[in-house]
Every structure is written in structure tokens, then in C-alpha cells.
Amino acid sequence: MADETNQPHMHEGRPVPTPPAQAPASGPIGGDPDAAAPELGKLNVDYTIPGVEPDDTDPYRWHTGEKRDHGGEDAIEVIDLVKQFGTTRIQNGLNLGLPDDEVSMVLGPSGTGKSVLIKLIVGLLYPDAGDILVHGESVPNMTDDELFEMRKKFGLLFQDGALFGSMNIYDNTAFPLRQHTDKSEDEIAEIVNRRLGEVGLAEAHYKMPNELSGGMRKRAGFARALVLDPAIVFFDEPDSGLDPVRTALLCELIREVHEENGGCYMVISHDLGTARRIADFIAVLWKGRIVESGPSEELFNSDNDFVRQFLNAEVDGPLAMD
């Protein structure tokens, strides 16, 4: 993935998207809404393959974009999303809908922009074109105050837990409540104790992050992500760095907590074992677009060449080492 230090310029303390030269911004983000949409799908890469007919060199020939019906409402809708860093297109006309009250997984090869997608949804990055709707509200078009309020709907578990190293586990978990609510310490203690108990850390209140194993840090981060009772929870590769048994235990924990609390859970990963254990809905991301999406059982039985290869870890297929 390209260096993300190439940030948009600032206007009144707020980043303003600067459209890439190849794809002028359009729609709700900038430009004339009646103007033609930017031409997508032409990356700065030569896809010519020696000995292969030109018609077979289209990098998006496997991207049907089909979204199989999940029978519910979408909590998150991503519409014609474009994000570019320098000359590298990360999202390239991405369309995605994630159902409410289900555990969804966005799967794809490493370096396909899965983590960038989370940052765009929560408003940490701004798209160059397209739109992102959370419960029907456009994230890129929100004011700073609206964005601050909207983020209270979110819980986020980072790859390493992202705990504050100077705080013990109790204070790490209590931090969002102290920062964003007026609850008393007694009320905070009740919530923190309940959430730490749910993730199996009831006896670890006063341990520091450097005293915990990787799996325990992830569970502590999960507890912190839940204390504000979020409607949407994001997991950025929660299985990264865990052994198979602890991965299975974390997956079981995610399922149990979701069954109790509901909401839209979005899990970013490329681990097929995790997908089979917890996913109700799967979207396969490749080359900046969704290849296909739908209920997990249907995706695992897809006849799409790329989806079948990726979800069955097959050697033969469109995805190669390059």
C-alpha cells in the first residue's frame, strides 16, 4: 500500500479531498453533480500479459459486483468510492452494503485497501469521489460536530488492541466513558466490570498492557470497543498474530457478544478459518472493488473463478503471487 502521508489540504481545521488527476471528484464530495462520473477501472498499471488475448487482460473481468440478498437493511452503504494516494488507486469505484445485525467480513488479499476502507467509513480519511452512508447519513458531508457525534456509534478493535501503555486495563477500558459521557465513577465501574467479564478479563483490571499476552490485549481492546454500546463495531484483522486456538476462542467470543448485543459487526481479514467461524455476510475485495458479496454460505459456493479460488485457497486461478 502506498504511503498515507500524502494527506488532503486543510480548510478550517478539516481535510478537504483533493481529487486525483485521473478521476476528478464528482457527486456529493465535490465538482458538478450533473457532470459525467469519473472513468474508473484504469489504474496506472500495464495489465498486458504476453500470449494472452487483449480481451482477457481486463483486471476487472471477474468483478461481477453481484450482491446477493441478505434479507435485511444495510447499516453501511459505500457508493462508487474512489481513494487515491499519489499515483496509487486504493479504492477504485467500490460499491458495498453491510447488513445491520449481522457479522460481516470483508476479505481480500493483503494490500487491497481493507484497513483504508475502515478509515474512510469512520471519517479518518476522506474519499476523492463517491459517498459513504452510515444509517442513511453521508459521512464525508458531515460537519466536525456531526462527525464527532456519529463516531459514538462506532467501536473499533485494532490489530494489536491499541491500548494506552501508561494505563492499566481498567483505565484503558474506562477511557471512552470518561471522555464521552457524564457518567459517575460508580456507573463507569459497573459497565467496565461487565465488559471485562464478558471478554474473560475480570481478574486483570490492574495489569498493564505490557503484562498481557497478544490475545489478552485484543480482548481488552474488544472490551473497550464495547463500553459505549456501539451500533457498529469494526475489527481490523483481530486474528493477526494469534495461534489457531486463540483465534478460535476470539471468534467464539465475537459471536457470543454479537448474539447478546446485536448491531453491525464488520471484520477485516484474509483468514478463511475466521470467515467460516463467524461470518454471516462476506464481501470479497480485490483491486479496489468488490468482486462479489452475499450470505457466507452462498459466497463459499460461488462459481466466480476468483471468489472460488480465494475462499478455497486454491493454487490455480486469477490470483497469483505478483
Image (cartoon, helix red, strand yellow):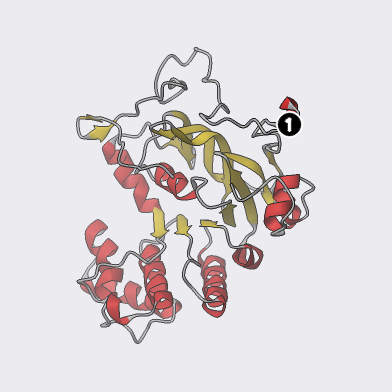
> Which element type, helix, strand or loop, lies under badge 1?
helix
Q: Quadrant of residue 97?
A: top right
Q: Residue at x 40, y 58 (%)?
A: 156
Residue extending furthest toward the bottom: 203
Relative depth, front residue between 22 and 19: 22
In screen coordinates, is 20 left or right of 254? left
Q: Quadrant of residue 25?
A: top left
Q: Quadrant of residue 143?
A: top left
Relative depth, front residue between 80 and 303: 303
Residue extending furthest toward the front: 50
Q: Residue at x 37, y 66 (%)?
A: 161
Q: Position of residue 134 (x, y in %)?
A: 47, 42
From this viewpoint, is residue 142 visible?
Answer: yes
Q: In this figure, what is the number of numbered marks?
A: 1
Q: Tell me: residue 52, above or below residue 271.
A: above
Residue for badge 1 = 56
Q: Position of residue 98 (x, y in %)?
A: 57, 47
From this viewpoint, is residue 102 visible?
Answer: no
In screen coordinates, is 274 left or right of 156? right
In screen coordinates, is 53 left or right of 212? right
Q: Position of residue 119 (x, y in %)?
A: 40, 46
Q: Decide: few, some or many residues near mark 1? Use Cα within 10 Å; few <14, some 14-19, many ≥20.
A: few
Q: Position of residue 45 (x, y in %)?
A: 54, 31
Relative depth, front residue between 81 and 306: 306
Query: Which amino acid lies under the numbered mark 1 shown in the image of this protein?
Result: Asp
Q: Tell me: residue 121, above or below residue 213.
A: above
Q: Quadrant of the N terminus?
A: top left
Q: Residue at x 41, y 17 (%)?
A: 31
